[in-house]
Image: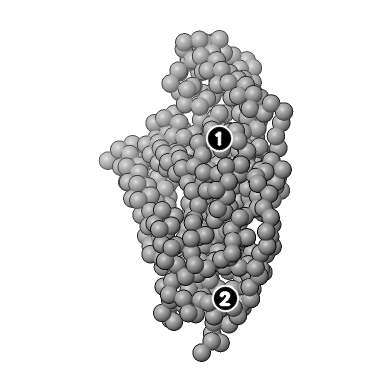
Amino acid sequence: MEKFALLEIIYLIGSVTFIIGLKMMGNARSARNGNLIAAAGMIAAIFGTIFLHEGEVQPVVYALIFGAIGLGTVVGWMTAKRVQMTKMPELVSMFNGMGGACAALIGLMEFEHNAGSTGAMIAIVAGTVIGSISFSGSIIAFLKLNGTMNKPIRLPSYNIINTIMMAGVLIFSGWVVYAASANGGSLWMQSAAGPELAHGAMLFIYILFAVAIIYGILFTVPIGGADMPVVISLLNSFTGLAAAFGGFLYDNKIMLTGGILVGSAGTLLTLVMCKAMNRPLSNVIFGAFGGSSSAASGTEVKGSIKDSSATDIAILMNYSKKVVIVPGYGLAVAQAQHVIHELEQLLEDRGVEVKYAIHPVAGRMPGHMNVLLAESNVAYEKLVEMEDINPEFDQTDVVLVVGANDVVNPAAKTDPSSPIYGMPILEVDRAKNIIVNKRSMSAGYAGIDNLLFYDTKCSMFFGDAKKALTELVNEIKNLS
């Protein structure tokens, strides 16, 4: 069998593993195996490309390739093993940015080798621009998530500036494609050996690369922290799209398949996130939701709160029939997922029905809470989505909110002046009793007070989630 035919078979197998792996990731129980299957397909494709490559390859090239693979494997493995669950969104943003950077570098390297080919130039320029935007945007998202850039920056006439920048990038990209292809040809010249780039023509692709980097920064900088799950999904789809253009350029089936899957999945997830917040994507990009408190002004909340002790909560839960736990970012920060699973098991041993209410944008990235709870072996069947759990709150004796804020704020339903008005929330205010565990009364990412805290049925349980829940578990154990 010829090398090319064998390589195509490997690419086909790899593409199938991507599709199977993605399907299996739709279920928490099979997600790990799905990830391993997709990874195995990628490994096969990488080694197939290296060893079944047409033409002679110098030993030094093999040494450089395997050296880079080894270095990347070690760095990636160590980083992933050491990262805390609270830092997973930052890691995802960084890895996504590296994917975008790779797509952009492919475009920079291949530009001079494809002069005169319109189709190749479209793939190169598109991959360079989209990959550059994904790279710089992901780095800004990383800085926002880790707190380095904890406030959105709003330039004067920001929307106008960004629109002009976007139009400029598109127009310049179109001109570069035209000028470097057979239709235009102003950047290339014909020689005996074929089309060649004119002297200095590479400058234009570098300028385009730099402008796209700047646009990626301007695109992401003003977006508030509450919208980061949406932005991460959107930038992820950009990286997939850039990789797909690389597949077109090289006629590489597995790059094309992987890029399309990532791009389409990221796009669909972005739309799901927007729907979960009841906001159009354009409003996410240009609205800067989740900005500073001054920017996110709503009706000022006045009222008194009730403080409750671990003993009181333990007695209340012990004699309940149904308890719903609402996890949020505070649970991840405190690394309290194992303690809350112990609380769940303890209550179930006493005949209490326990479920977890999962809001689509809880945490700092899509699925953050699902992954966090899966780490502590919480049964996947106990994780109930917002649409399914909301009708059950009327029959719930106790709701325990741990580190969540904006996703349970009744202002989204009752206060038209609130920046989160219209956003679907977990309707915990309908439960018979509400317990909220927080470190303080500080506002959430939307920068507004939470009306729930002043509800007559609500009691505050202040303290670090891990310490407070451990105290609660001990109190329940001490009950006869």
Q: CA distance from mark 1 to mark 2?
A: 40 Å
**Element under disc 1:** helix
> Which residue is at a point 43% across and 63% down the rendered structure image?
394
Local secondary structure at mark 2: helix
Q: Nearer the viewer, residue 468 or 212?
A: 468
Q: Nearer the viewer, mark 1 or mark 2?
A: 2
> Can residue 206 be seen here?
no
Which of pointers 1 and 2 lies earlier in the amino acid sequence? 1
Quadrant assignment, res 176: top right
> With respect to residue 81, does 294 lie above or below?
above
Hey, what amino acid is under mark 1?
A: Asn
Would you say 6 lies left or right of 325 here?
left
- Neighbour class for label 1 at 10 Å: few (<14), some, many (≥20)? few
Screen quadrant of the N terminus: top left
The mark total stands at: 2
Provide the residue designation for mark 2.
313
Residue type pointed to by label 2: Ile
Checking the image for residue 283, the label placed there is 1
| Left or right for 61, reference 249 | right
The spot of residue 255 in percent (x, y) is 42, 38
Q: Does 70 appear above or below 374?
A: above
